[in-house]
Amino acid sequence: MTQQNSRRLVQAVLVSLNGVTSEPLRWAGPYFGEGSAARSRTVLEDSGAMLMGRHTYEVFSRQWPSVPGPYADRLNAMPKYVFSATLDRPEWTNTTVVRGAVVEAVSALKHQHGKDLVVYGHGRFGQTLCDAGLVDELTLTVVPVFVADGETLYRPGGSARTWELVGAGPGSDPGLASLTYRPRA
């Protein structure tokens, strides 16, 4: 758990009924409406910075800079940290590339003063954060679809962790379910 005066790291993950988390743009879109958009805006407003791996950066930086509206405005304006050994020049505004030791760099960001840090998705970067015990809140939005292929929420080789359910209920739009967990001490 975070120490007092530390920022929380909040991870928000879209997951199919069969546990797939990769490429949610292919399968989750039809289930997202105004409720999900409002919930996402709230998460962003409560966040001081967004953390992501290279793949998420590539997807988001192609999509959001040219989109109008309050969600895109907030996302484009907020500080963003991309953890990548290969990205040289980020073109998305307010983006910093972080190289090297992910766990140490994220720990340092968590100890800075400010609002929560947010991570969308759960690829290798997200699993690294969970394995290291850096995630303070994990929200799974379960999308009512089976996905034929893709990376799953938990991959072999990860660290075993125990989580405590702190919130469960319908998602922000029909058909979705929301499960919120915190690490169990």
Image (cartoon, rainbow, N blue to C red):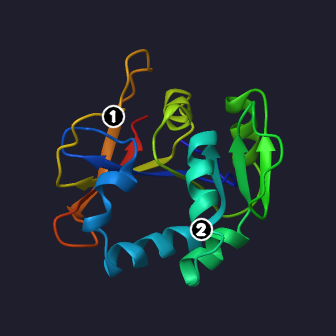
Question: Three-letter amino acid code at disc 1?
Answer: Gly
Q: Is residue 180 visible?
A: no
In the image, residue 129 above or below residue 56: above
Q: Residue at x 78, y 27 (%)?
A: 100
Q: Is residue 8 left or right of residue 17?
A: right
Locate residue 123, reporting x and y percent.
48, 36
Quadrant of the drawing holding the C terminus:
top left
Q: Residue at x 31, y 69 (%)?
A: 32
Which residue is at the front of the view, 169 or 75?
A: 75
Q: Which residue occupies the extreme top position in the image?
A: 157
Q: Which residue occupies the extreme bottom position in the image?
A: 69
Which residue is at the front of the view, 112 or 126?
A: 126
Q: On the image, which quarter does residue 70 sit in?
A: bottom right
Circle 2 residue: 64
Locate residue 114, reporting x and y percent.
72, 62
Going from the N terminus, do you reach mark 1 or mark 2 first?
2
Q: Is residue 172 visible?
A: yes
Question: Which mark is drawn over residue 150?
Answer: 1
Q: On the image, which quarter does residue 170 sit in?
A: bottom left
Q: Is residue 128 left or right of residue 159?
A: right
Q: Residue at x 72, y 50 (%)?
A: 81
Could you say whether the residue bearing mark 2 is in a helix, strand or loop? loop
Locate residue 155, reporting x and y percent.
38, 24
Q: Residue at x 25, y 46 (%)?
A: 16
Would you call the spot at circle 2 few (<14 residues within 10 Å), some (14-19), or many (20 or more)? some
In the image, residue 148 above or below residue 61: above
Locate residue 63, reporting x and y percent.
56, 64
Q: How many marks?
A: 2
Which residue is at the front of the view, 118 or 68?
A: 68
Question: Three-letter amino acid code at disc 2?
Answer: Trp
Could you say whether the residue bearing mark 1 is in a helix, strand or loop? loop
